[in-house]
Image (cartoon, rainbow, N blue to C red):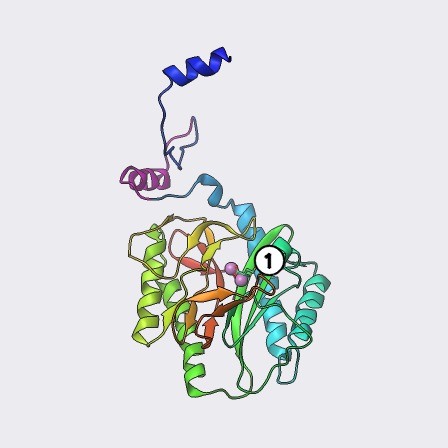
Amino acid sequence: MCFIAVIMGNLLKKKKNRRQWHAIAGEPLTEMDKIIMAWENRGKLVPTRKLVKTPEQIEGIRRAGVLNTAVLDHVAEHIREGMSTEEINTLVHTFTVEHGGIPAPLNYEGFPKSVCTSINEVVCHGIPSEDEILEEGDIINVDVTTILGGYYADASRMFVIGKTTPEKQRLVDVARECLQIGIEACHPYCFVGDIGNAIARHAHKNGFTVVRDLCGHGVGNEFHEDPDIVHYGKKGSGMLLVPGMVFTIEPMVNMGDWHVFVDADDDWTVVTEDELPSAQWEHTLLMTETGVEILTY
Ligand code: MF3
Ligand code: CO
Ligand code: CO
């Protein structure tokens, strides 16, 4: 029998939720420390210090963002009717590597390609394929994530192939507005729920729904970090967002019901349950002292 374990078990108090935010030992509390600790005392979810990027990390993520935007611009220049999604994959892969970057999706948790291409009823995580040809009227999300110098940036855009139906065009436009409105809801010391609330309101006002099973995320040092940026919810819910945090907003807006499923054939492709179209736009954002900066413009 272990003597120490018995003593510890008998004498030590247990505590479930340790503080997330710690002041730096030996240094006076900053204004930011005080605000975060006050919210934590009121029971709100606050970040850990690790989620607040250093100036050096921000610079690295900024550079990754510039390349990520150039990749998406490159796709925008070349995407056309008759092209396969495999060709989009080649465009993304070649351009990224030629500019010293690494396409983050490739081999990420077993993902087999360098970009996600999601057409019509595919919500996200579509896998590029030679057999998938872009047709007039298709709406496609191209989701690019780039690693440069060890830092990550993540953004996606919708492309309309030729001319589509007025309903699908409106879905694409409203999804873009949802991202914009989410960005406008961001200010230092806001909550994730403030963003989600604004996004869902706008989608619902337009007769659309918001996917609940997938969300935005912290990003920068890794592909997916805390916190979850959900695109619905109550104001004031979720994590407090403070200057120095980097995260994505990436609402998936559905024409029909919000429910989705994962294609059992590949374990990746996310499809709307009613197989009606879905649209998504994504940016990587930096919270600053005064507002929010888009790192993937
Ligand atoms: N880029 C997606 C996102 O916005 C994640 C894709 S994961 C992959 O979070 F493995 F499918 F690439
Ligand atoms: Co993405
Ligand atoms: Co993302």
Residue 249 covered by magenta stretch = no
Closest to the observer: 56 or 92? 92
Give the residue type that dot 1 points to.
Ala
**Residue named by callout 1:** 64
Residue 33 covered by magenta stretch = yes
Quadrant of the image occupied by residue 233: bottom left
> In the rendered view, would you say 67 is above or below 189?
below
Please tell me whether mark 1 sits on a helix, a strand or a loop. Answer: helix
Q: Residue at x 29, y 37 (%)?
A: 41
| Residue 55: x %, y % from top left | 52, 46
| Residue 88: x %, y % from top left | 65, 73
Q: Residue at x 67, y 64 (%)?
A: 96
Quadrant of the image occupied by residue 229: bottom left
The mark total stands at 1
Closest to the observer: 296 or 116? 116
> In the rendered view, would you say 208 is above or below 111?
below
Find the magenta span and give its range: 26-44
> In the rendered view, would you say 218 is above or below 260?
above
User: Does mark 1 have its CB less than 8 Å from ligand 2?
Assistant: no
Quadrant of the image occupied by residue 69: bottom right
